[in-house]
Image (cartoon, coloured by chain):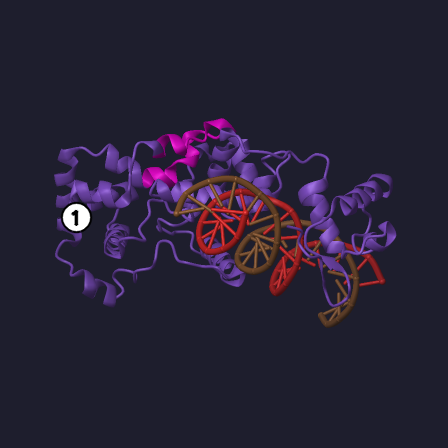
Chain colours: A purple, B red, C brown
Amino acid sequence: MMRTPSNDESGLKKGPWSPEEDKILVDHIQKHGHGSWRALPKLAGLNRCGKSCRLRWNNYLRPDIRRGKFSDEEEQLIINLHSVLGNKWASIATHLPGRTDNEIKNFWNTHLKKKLMQMGLDPVTHRPRTDHLDLLSNLQQIILNAANIVSNCDINNALRLQYSLLPQSLVNGVLGFNNNIQNFYDGSNIGISSQIIQPNLQNFEAPLQQFLPQECDEYTQKFDEQIGNTNVDSAISTNLLPKLVSISPQRSATAKVREENMMINEKECCNTSSTSFETWGDFMNEDANDAYWKDIIEQQY
DNA sequence: AACGCGGACAACCGCCACTAC
DNA sequence: AGTAGTGGCGGTTGTCCGCGT
């Protein structure tokens, strides 16, 4: 079925490009370069706006574009990069020669997002999904926050505490942990040591998998000794514990995301003594001087 | 064969940052 | 310093196409 060509109010054509239009655009750019995109359509004889020409060229016609199915290596690279960069498709695309940001974005939205969800991971945070059990999510948050106020109690201890308070069947079943996760987040194929890429997951997973029964009692005892007598509700109401926040808030508007990023940047910039689990600092370690990692961070900021 | 549905992806839209003046 | 023009980016939409009924 042929799509009926649509034109905007200025008479410029919109919608899919025809092979003839493609040829005109390619011929013109090969002969003259694109120059000013705004001026290009008139010079080339195309009834399109400059922006449409630029998108068509950059996303489809450019000779260095590699089309076709994403390889397993590319797929894993995208996942790893997304766990570091988030929805910075343009930045991610710079690490995949021949792939466009648009192509990667589409691939993420149609394939990888689902794949992560099927593995029980939140595609936004790359952490185990919590959306299907708010109660558990809140409990995690309470315990993590509690750990933050316990002196010298790091995040792994907090998770051990959490684990010690939950039946194993609940942890495994609800959070959807499985053995594939470790392999899934192996960053070795992009030259990043697995310790760099994995910590955001290890913080959750490793304490659970490598947990020793005797440590349960040890940390539970520590928890009880230090804050065990504290009523959680009253602790929250008296600001002893921070208020609960969603671990994976639903956000769709660009403005919201940007606002959030600004807040995160501001927080990280100003709060040098942060103990929050959510901040970048927790994912960094002494290995972070890896050149590739630096490159990624530089792109982020 | 006709139809509906959902996945895939090309293209568009709106906003933002940068630059020149 | 303010403004207009331009290109880049990310979110979203619209259409095609394959598949099942």
Left or right: residue A119 versus residue A7 is: left
Front in this rendered view, residue B7 or A183: B7
Front in this rendered view, residue A185 or A263: A185
Left or right: residue A223 versus residue B7 is: left
Which amino acid is tagged 1?
Phe
Front in this rendered view, residue A38 or A152: A38
Identify the chain of the residue marked 1, using the numbered disc in the image. A
Left or right: residue A282 versus residue A1 is: left
Q: Position of residue A27 (x, y in %)?
A: 83, 41
Task: Examine the rendered structure and indicate whether residue A246 appears above or below residue A238.
Answer: above
Which residue is labeled 1 in the image? A223
Q: Position of residue A76 (x, y in %)?
A: 47, 33
Q: Residue at x 58, y 36 (%)?
A: A95
Determine if residue A219 is in view: no
Task: Examine the rendered structure and indicate whether residue A267 appears above or below residue A62.
Answer: below
Q: Residues within 10 Å of mark 1 (few under 14, many from 20)?
A: many
Q: Any magenta on residue A186?
A: yes
Q: Any magenta on residue A112?
A: no
Left or right: residue A262 versus residue A180 is: right
Q: Residue at x 40, y 33 (%)?
A: A184
Quadrant housing residue A114: top left
Front in this rendered view, residue A128 or A150: A128
Query: What span is colored magenta in the figure?
Result: A181-203
Magenta: predominant secondary structure element?
helix
Q: Position of residue A29 (x, y in %)?
A: 82, 43
Q: Residue at x 51, y 62 (%)?
A: A253
Task: Examine the rendered structure and indicate whether residue A253 appears above or below residue A151.
Answer: below
Quadrant housing residue A83: top left
Q: Position of residue A150 (x, y in %)?
A: 24, 50
